[in-house]
Amino acid sequence: MARYIGNTNEDRDQMLKEVGLSNMDSLFDAVPESVLLKSDLNIPRAQSEIELMKNLKALSNKNLNVDNYTCFLGAGSYDHHIPAVIDQLLLRQEFFTAYTPYQPEISQGTLQVIFEYQTMISELTGLPVVNASMYDGATSMTEAAIMACESTKRKEILVAKSVHPENRQVLNTYAKFRDMTVTELSYQNGQVDVEDLKNKLNNNTAAVIIQSPNFFGVIEDIKQIADMAHENKSLIILNADPISLALLKSPEESGVDIAVGDGQPLGNPMSFGGPSLGYMAVTDKLMRKIPGRIVGETVDKEGNRGFVLTLQTREQHIRREKATSNICSNQALNALTATIYMTLMGKEGLKKVAELCYNKSHYAYDELIKTGKFSPVFDAPFFKEFVVKSGEQVNALNSKLLKKNIIGGYEVELQYPELKDGWMIAVTEKRTKAEIDDLVRKAVE
């Protein structure tokens, strides 16, 4: 380990002498004997770099991966194409950082990336104000709910049951400690039950949270729900797949106050569920309530273009009681990835990806239904993900496909017991016709 920790035995002896100790064990004298480990750690002996890399690769090869398996699993993390150039651009020294620009004047590369990221998310959502990103889609949605409560001085959040279950769990965790009430809205045909929404809207409703495309992949009638929320003087929060925004109406066009979502589809790998980034875009009216930070463009005294932290509402920069959030980092490296991806794809490229997802998923849906082994669960419009009812248990179906190098769909029944034998398939632009046909054929064998 000397290559990574350069302290020699002589160095350690000198440091111990300086603090008046005779050996390393003396550093832990304050730790009670009862909690000290009395045996050696169960770890292998030290290895050379060659041995270590071979062992790590052997362990890695035991994992399923989307290079060797065809993936139809989504449910929040998607197998989109990642251009090879992204990894190379990520390594440029002026950009390569995942940490906070504490000294922004010497972090111009980082600030420029964030500024460009904010600009592109604003163009995607149609909303004028975008922060420097959040941890992930779940925290972004939850911070939006907190912001809605602070802005409206109300305490209840109505959240659709068709919103990702894990996002709702994070929301409930935060709400428990912030004196917020979270009430779920039921669904009909995979979409928000507007009658249930009408009955539950009240003068304490701060915001209505919906997801579109929602967890089932279904596209919601956002405008209708937004109008109902605004009539009640509540805000509307939309959780949206950023790829879908290249094809569907923008949140701004649908009357959305806060648009949030997970940026994983924008060039970030699935990586066993993370890390990722959460995007957040708001109206001008909510700018002062937005969590995190906003990067702005300016000029220096010589007229050169430069970037500054325009708004910093996090608790490390201002008095804690005045902070909008205690989230401190903005997942800058993942936001950089998203920025490079959006730059490479451009407007037409993003639209093409969205169209391919839409067309290929609908082809897969039609082919599965044709077999007679699968039946529709919802007949509402969907984007790139859909639920069908399987003629056999989903876990058995997925196990069968896995033996044939196919990662099958999500077992919806795990989170929605009422959708027994529901199988949720995600189809991205990466899936070929041959791969889809192979899924259909092997699913019915």
Image (spheres, rainbow, N blue to C red):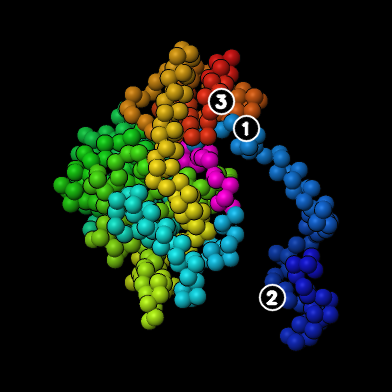
Quick check: 47 above or below 162? below
| Residue that mark 2 sits on | 30
Q: Position of residue 55 (x, y in %)?
A: 78, 47
Q: Which residues are magenta?
A: 75-87
Quick check: 196 above or below 176? above
Q: Are marks 1 and 2 in contact (CB under 8 Å)?
A: no
Seen from this angle, which residue lies furthest left?
Answer: 231
Nearer mark to the viewer, of 1 and 2 = 1
- In the displayed structure image, the side of residue 85 where residue 165 appears, left or right: left
Q: Nearer the viewer, residue 247 or 241?
A: 247
Q: Between disc 3 and disc 2, whose residue precedes?
A: 2
Q: CA distance from mark 1 to mark 3?
A: 10 Å
| Residue that mark 1 sits on | 69
- Residue at 56 percent of width and 33 percent of height: 71
Quarter of the picture holding the C terminus: top right
Q: Are marks 1 and 3 in contact (CB under 8 Å)?
A: no
Quarter of the picture holding the N terminus: bottom right
Quick check: 3 above or below 269? below
- In the displayed structure image, the side of residue 426 where residue 130 appears, left or right: left
Element class at badge 2: loop
Q: Position of residue 93 (x, y in %)?
A: 58, 65
Classify 10 Å Cα crowding around label 3: few (below 14), some (14-19), many (20 and above). Answer: some
